[in-house]
Amino acid sequence: MPRRIIGIDPGLTRCGVGIVDVSRGRALEFVHVSVIQTHADQDLGKRLRLIGDGVEELLDRYQPEVLALERVFAEQRNLNTVMGVAQISGIVLREAALRDIATQLHTPSEVKAAVTGYGRAEKAQVGEMVRRLLGLDQPPKPADAADALALAICASWQTGAPSPRPAMRMHGSGARSVAAPTRAQEAWLAAERAAKSRGRA
């Protein structure tokens, strides 16, 4: 049975939600993506309730086994952004705990590294990689949607899978360690092969 993972990119104005299924062989399948939106002129309590209600409805409808959430990190300079992310994160974690859903917390750089192989990738690169990995016609929009799916993909590769062992390559009189391809790089190559195969069909 595939394992269902939900990724949530928390934000007070736009809260991205992405859901994927991952099979035993790490094959990914797109399930759902959406963005829960509120307006800055709304009362804070109402905005939190709207997002909480939206998250609750999606958790009950899709019943994921794992929830991946963006971690609040101190380097964010905008205090309002940090507060909004923290408030939404608290709501999401509570809803997950009520349903006994396992949770993972990842920083943006961790997600970028897992999905693209580079921790400082641009949002456009993340969106394109998400598109390729999930076989979508175009990158999910807005960026919050792509980020949520990237969180789910990141979690799918960190649920008990062993880390790839480095390959050894001879260099001169000794051997040196060469890092094996990351899961993101392997998945990228697989997506490209699939695309070429579809083009020949």
Image (cartoon, grey):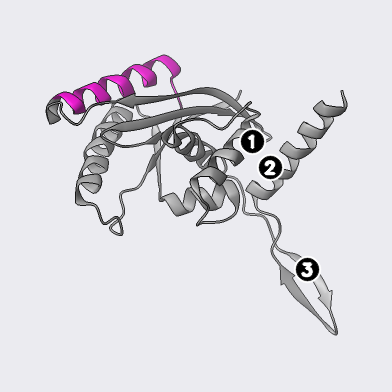
Side of 60 relative to 180 (left or right): left
Residue matched to label 2: 187
Side of 23 relative to 109 (left or right): right
Query: Residue at position x 14%, y 31% from top?
Result: 44
Residues at marks 2 and 3, CA–CA distance in whole angstroms: 22 Å
Mark number displayed over residue 168: 3
Please tell me whether mark 1 or mark 3 is closer to you in this view.
Answer: 1
Q: In this orientation, does residue 151 appear?
A: yes
Residues at marks 1 and 3, CA–CA distance in whole angstroms: 28 Å
Q: Quadrant of the N terminus?
A: top right
Q: Secondary structure at mark 1?
A: helix
Side of 22 relative to 141 (left or right): right
- Magenta residues span 46-64
Q: Quadrant of the C terminus?
A: top right
Residue 65 image position (x, y, % from top left): 46, 28
Residues at marks 2 and 1, CA–CA distance in whole angstroms: 6 Å
Residue 41 image position (x, y, % from top left): 15, 28
Side of 161 relative to 34 (left or right): right
Q: Quadrant of residue 135?
A: top right
Mark number displayed over residue 174: none
Label 2–label 1 contact, CB within 8 A:
yes
138, above or below 165, in the image: above
- Dominant SS type (magenta): helix
